[in-house]
Image (spheres, coloured by chain):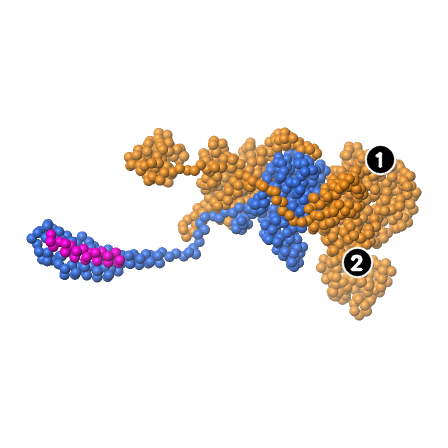
Chain colours: A orange, B blue
Amino acid sequence: MKAPVSWIRELVDLPAEVTTEVLTDRLTALGLKLEGIHAAGAEIRGPLVIGKVLTKEPEPQKNGKTINWCSVDVGDANGTGEPQGIVCGAHNFEPGDLVVVILPGGALPGGFEISARKTYGHVSAGMICSVRELGIGDDHDGILVLPPDAGAPGDDVFGLLGLDEEVIEFEINPDRAYALSLRGVAREAALGFGVPYADPAVRELPAPDGKAWEVVVDDPAGCPVFAARLVSGFDPAAPTPDVIKQRIEQAGMRSISLAVDITNYVMLELGQPIHGYDADKVAGALGVRRAHEGETLTTLDDTVRTLASEDLVITDDSGPIGLAGVMGGATTEMSATTTRILVEAAHWDAVSMFRTGRRHKLTSEAGKRNERGVDPLLPGIAADRVVELLVEHGGATAEPGYTLVGSAPQRSSITIATDLPARLSGIEISAMTTVENLRAIGATVTEREAGTIEVLPPTWRPDLNDPYDLVEEVVRIVGYDQVPSVLPRRATGRGLTRTQRLRRRVGRTLAGAGLVEVVSFPFVGEATFDKLGLVADDPLRTTVGLANPLSSEEPAYTTTLLPGLLEAAGRNLGRGAPGVALFETGTVAFPADNGPAPIYGVHTRPSVAELEKLDEALPLQPQHLAVVLAGERRRTGWWGAGSDAAWSDALAVVRRLAGELGVTIEVASANRMPWHPGRCAVVSIAGVQVGHAGELHPTVCRAYGLPARSAAVELDLDALMAAATDVAPGPSFSTMPLAKEDVALVVDAAVTVAAVEAALREGAGDLLETVRLFDVYTGEQIGAGKKSLAFALRFRAPDRTLTEAETGAARDAAVARAAELTGAVQR
Amino acid sequence: MSGPNTDYDPVEVAAVSPAELEAARDAALAAIAAAADLEQLKAVRTEHAGDRSALALANREIGALPPQARKEAGQRVGQARGAVSKALTARQEVLEAEHEARILVEEAVDVTLPTDAEPVGARHPLTTGAELIADIFVAMGWEVAEGPVIEAEWLNFDALNLGPDHPARTMQDTFWTEPADHHVVLRTHTSPVQARTMLTRTPPIYVVCPGRVFRTDEYDATHSPMFHQVEGLAIDEGISMAHLKGTLDHFASQMFGEGITTRFRPSYFPFTEPSAEVDLVCFVCRGVDSDQCRTCRGEGWIEWGGCGIVNPRVLQACGVDSERYSGFAFGMGIDRTLMFRHGLEDLRTLFEGDVRFTTAFGSEL
Ligand SMILES: [Zn+2]
């Protein structure tokens, strides 16, 4: 909402010392938030004066153009009193005309500095301005010619053109729709400074007699009030007075014609949208009804609209002639020949207005007000005001008759305890202040039993329905700055939950392992899964789709965190990083396919069973953890050669995390895209798969621009955290001496280390403390298809020093079991 | 080697004669003193105190003396050997100390050599930022509540007094999952977590809800289809705007520094009534000479979020007795908060995954 300051001041008697800034500060404190203060001439620097054209010599140029060499009287504004020589390209003026001249040293909007400059063989000392150059209109028709009585040559024109007029732009919240009018803004200003306010909506109206035009309202719920008036003898050529034109433009609307301008002016003034019809084009009675499904209407913007049965329309004998409250129709539009005007001002159901606006993607100044709620007492008043202005400025005659169908819906009053504002705000607010402030916003307050009042909100405040709504009104006038600062003292929480603490631990562990956290968008498409090399029926391709994705390429919520991480890894390497190690934790989603989520009422709490239904309809949304390791993992330096990320680094991350959380994991080889088929591990907890880790498939590395051998992990973080140890049992260990035995076992290349290790463990018995693989050898010495595994076995007894014989026997038993189970042969 | 010989006169046994002993001792002591390093000292030890040394020989000869002479000879030999042994030990200590001192000098390294073999990791500022906020509230006795990112329409809108015709419910603002008539959305705020908390717990309730939210905004320097919010909810007897102000002032000073407070401006949110916008004293200029301040652009205040008293309609939908309890709620963007706290120019840097961005926050608590 843009409100010219002079218009506000016309409606409310603000003290002279209240500057625009003081005014906007006060209004912001009351809830009309300042967006900005604009002045049309803010970018213009004078001297900008009236000039009288003395001579105008057309001079044809070689380029085919004709310029005018003019001498212009600018009074004493140029310091000499001599006529000013100015070259002008426009032709729409004659000697004797008064024009607007900017002199050298001045500047026009857009940083256009004016100086005396040589052009077309003359020194042009300034410029004769058009409205466009002044930034006050779009008129292309040439320079601005002032009325003969505009003033004397040399007079400053800032005031004359309204260039010094400040316009305040407010951001109007949905509950303050009344402030989409000067009536509302001025009311707030009066409230803010405690000064008298003359409500422009207070008018003497004729008694309704139904004789202005016949109106039939079929849908009183959609249209509770409909007012119509008629004027004749209107002069369609009559110009719009400057003040109306200026104010409309300052409010951000375009001046179109006197009749249209007047309806817009009154809408800005009072907040009531008004429509004018060319009465000669209206056939028969006006009707209001819901549209028939599929009916069409050509609106004022020359768009043919197919109507829905919810749309409210205005009809005449020909059918729909307007989309009620939103936009008029083309067939009855006022034109350059209109002399009889039928004025309509109606109160519409806000929800219908909102829906129609959305359905037809129409945002109009009228619709904006109608869908937020307009004072239902305004239709007759606004129509009368329009008639008054049409008569005053358009030479029209008001026809007798005033049609008013329906009446303002009854409001119910609100009972409120007088201490509620004090209790909810924490400010000391007396009962008297509560009553006074509610009266100040226009409410009717009746005292009931002790401590209780009954409040009938003013007609222009459809938003006030509950006691708490009234509290806001009382408190904003007292001032939000009066709210004291007091900490509540009753919170007795139990700290972070187990999951929250574990999630922090996971993040810290991974960062400690040299991984950098990434946050990426969860949107994916088929191309994303293609890039990962997933087969057509891969379960990860079954996604939760978005009905309105931002990009049709990525129309679904992701089932894997890897795509975002892989993109980020490629980005880092592309920007010159020698290597990158990234992790992300986040939600992935899998469809539940349990049907729609119910919509319940809001007057009572849904039952437990009903709440469960809501959750059942939601997709499964586990938290995942993913890691990508690409390029240099350990640096090369003076200490020796570093190394690049490999499949084993991915598993190292998994094991480190499992160790940190006290989770026992099992690892087995697997074949799963996007991993390398021979270098992928499936990770399980107690036999249940929780994810994969290993080297990425070469095609995936190439697709994301990552070096070969890059590695990745994706785990179900929920499952991992669920398995985390809550209470670690205290360990018991022996302090007796350690006995060491190393063994080298030759096995077939296909035998896994885990299998050999398990066999050794099993065979070694209780005396074995640890077993650890410390070397793997393949080569000629042991033959093709074989490998030699070197294990360090460590033995210890709880109660005694082991003898060589005991240790040797345990070692031999371990080797024997390994031979039995894995075919191992000791070297 | 001689066995015991009772006929020998001790003085006639040359090796144990006082003069010989003295000479051997002095020669040993001189050699010890002259030993320049541990190597030489080792040779000296062998020569003068070893099995074949004169003193060792003398010691062995004692046994060959007549019993009456053994005691005196034994004393003499013992004294000489003792003096040599003591001198050896002392010299050994001196030379070892010298040796170690020299080694330590030789082993000196350039301590300015780099040691960055291992990669450096970091958590994302959105994570640590949310944790910082959570910690501020947990320290006040609040709890941290969470809920699903993909949420039921009823919980995201209806329960929060955003009626069926609220503009936010259109396709223009909210991501709907398919099929759209299944009433499931990507949550547009973390408020459904508040609703879930009220629906499943009884007051008093003090929870803070950080989380990821979605709106159909085109991605640019200041907008993102995914961003992060933190909302707070307190439901208790006698809760007022004063408690809201107190809580936000505390939050602001913990987050931005001592003395940073908030101010309220009337506003509108369906969830709250009365509602307010929260501004923060600019933590850079503190409202002094704001004209030059880039953070608040001359305002002296920074728009931080929205808040208010929980609308009784919301309490009603969530089964809270609005006659007995009142509550306050607030919400702000974590991303935005981080942007002005750290002077970030472009929101997109948060989501690009450039490690140089994230590791810069490694020093954050
Ligand atoms: Zn500042």
Is residue A595 depicted above or below B301 in this figure? above
- x and y percent of residue A566 in the render? 53, 42
Q: Per the image, is B87 magenta?
A: yes
| A455 sits left or right of B101 in the view | right
Is residue A143 visible to us here?
Answer: no
| B292 sits left or right of A663 in the view | right
Is residue B157 depicted above or below B60 in this figure? above
- Image quadrant holding the C terminus of chain A, namely top left
Q: Give the number of the disc on residue A205.
A: none
Q: Amino acid at mark 1?
A: Val
* Residue beneath the point at 86% across and 62% down: A96
Q: Chain of mark 2?
A: A
Identify the residue under disc 2: A16
Question: How far apart, in angstroms, are the residues tagged by discs 2 and 1?
Answer: 48 Å
* Element at label 2: loop
* Residue beneath the point at 19% across and 57% down: B79
- x and y percent of residue A490 in the render? 61, 42
Q: Residue furthest bottom?
A: A80
Give the camera-side residue of A785 and A289.
Answer: A289
* Residue range highlighted in magenta: B67-91
Q: Amino acid at mark 2?
A: Ala
| B165 sits left or right of A559 in the view | right
Q: Quadrant of residue A773?
A: top left
User: 10 Å neighbourhood of mark 1: few (<14), some, or many (≥20)?
Assistant: some
Is residue B287 visible to us here?
Answer: yes
Q: Considering only order in the chain, which callout, 1 or 2, is on the residue closer to the N terminus?
A: 2
Q: Give the number of the disc on residue A217.
A: 1
| B148 sits left or right of A133 in the view | left
* Element at label 1: strand
Dot 2 beta carbon under 8 Å from ligand 1: no
Give the camera-side residue of B106 and A467.
Answer: A467
- x and y percent of residue A706 in the render? 51, 44
